[in-house]
């Protein structure tokens, strides 16, 4: 980060290469829109470049980038709500454990996760999909570890209950 703060474009490229895919997955899972996820990730790296001098080494680079990206996603979701732009809701297929394969279960799980409240969805994404530990997740979202654990517990219960409805 010190090199990026000094204007080193090679160091910036290394950070982009290291974190782009992970940030994109998280942004896409939050926004359910490829273009919006691309925009959120691009904005994250623009902010990284323009605000690198503000980086506090007390936090990890990953947590700082996730914080920027999550906030950008929140901004997009607020913008959609304010302008009453509906996020496409996919109808859940009727499925039972006997007639559904692994790919269908994964697709159903993704549809269920999209319906979670925003905080729960972000925590679920960072903990279960991105495999961040509770402390890093709390740091990225500016929550306490207990808040992360509570949101994850609620998200897991909701996911479990919704999947039970489909016999999974």
Image: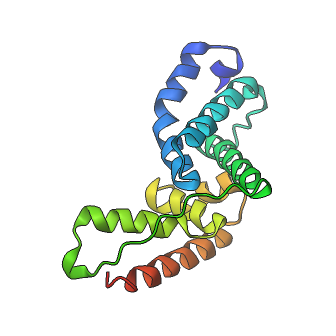
- Seen at 53% across and 28% down, the residue is 16
Residue 81, x across and y down, in percent: 74, 58
Q: How many marks?
A: 0
Q: Is residue 168 left or right of residue 14?
A: left
Residue 78 in the image: above or below residue 89: above
Name the quadrant containing residue 162.
bottom left
On screen, residue 95 above or below 57: below
Identify whether 159 is placed above or below 21: below
Residue 22 location, x and y as percent? 48, 43
Which picture quadrant has residue 50? top right
Front residue (pair 56, 49): 49
Quick one: quadrant of the C terminus? bottom left
Q: Position of residue 24 (x, y in %)?
A: 51, 42
Residue toward you, 31 or 80: 80
Q: Residue at x 65, y 65 (%)?
A: 119
* Residue 158 appears in the picture as rendered: yes
Q: Give the colour scheme shown.
A: rainbow
Residue at 67% x, 33% y: name it.
Answer: 43
Q: Is residue 2 left or right of residue 109?
A: right
The quadrant in which the N terminus is found is top right
Q: Nearer the viewer, residue 150 or 167?
A: 167
Is residue 25 shown above or below 56? below
Which residue is at 47% across, 53% downward? 130
Instruction: Answer whether residue 61 is visible to the viewer in this image.
Output: no
- Left or right placement of residue 71 versus residue 13 in this view: right
Residue 70 in the image, given as x and y percentages of width and height: 65, 49
């Amino acid at each position: 980060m010190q090199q990026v703060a000094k204007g080193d474009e090679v160091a910036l490229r290394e950070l982009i290469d290291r974190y782009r895919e992970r940030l994109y997955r998280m942004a896409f899972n939050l926004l359910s829109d490829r273009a919006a996820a691309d925009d959120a990730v691009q904005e994250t790296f623009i902010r990284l470049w323009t605000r690198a001098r503000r980086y506090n080494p007390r936090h990890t680079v990953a947590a700082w980038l996730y914080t920027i990206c999550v906030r950008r996603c929140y901004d997009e979701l607020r913008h959609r709500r304010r302008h009453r732009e509906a996020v496409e809701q996919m109808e859940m297929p009727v499925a039972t454990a006997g007639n559904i394969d692994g790919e269908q279960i994964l697709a159903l799980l993704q549809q269920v996760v999209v319906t979670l409240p925003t905080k729960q969805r972000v925590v679920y994404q960072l903990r279960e999909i991105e495999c961040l530990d509770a402390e890093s997740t709390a740091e990225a979202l500016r929550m306490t570890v207990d808040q992360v654990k509570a949101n994850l517990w609620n998200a897991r219960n909701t996911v479990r209950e919704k999947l039970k409805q489909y016999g999974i």
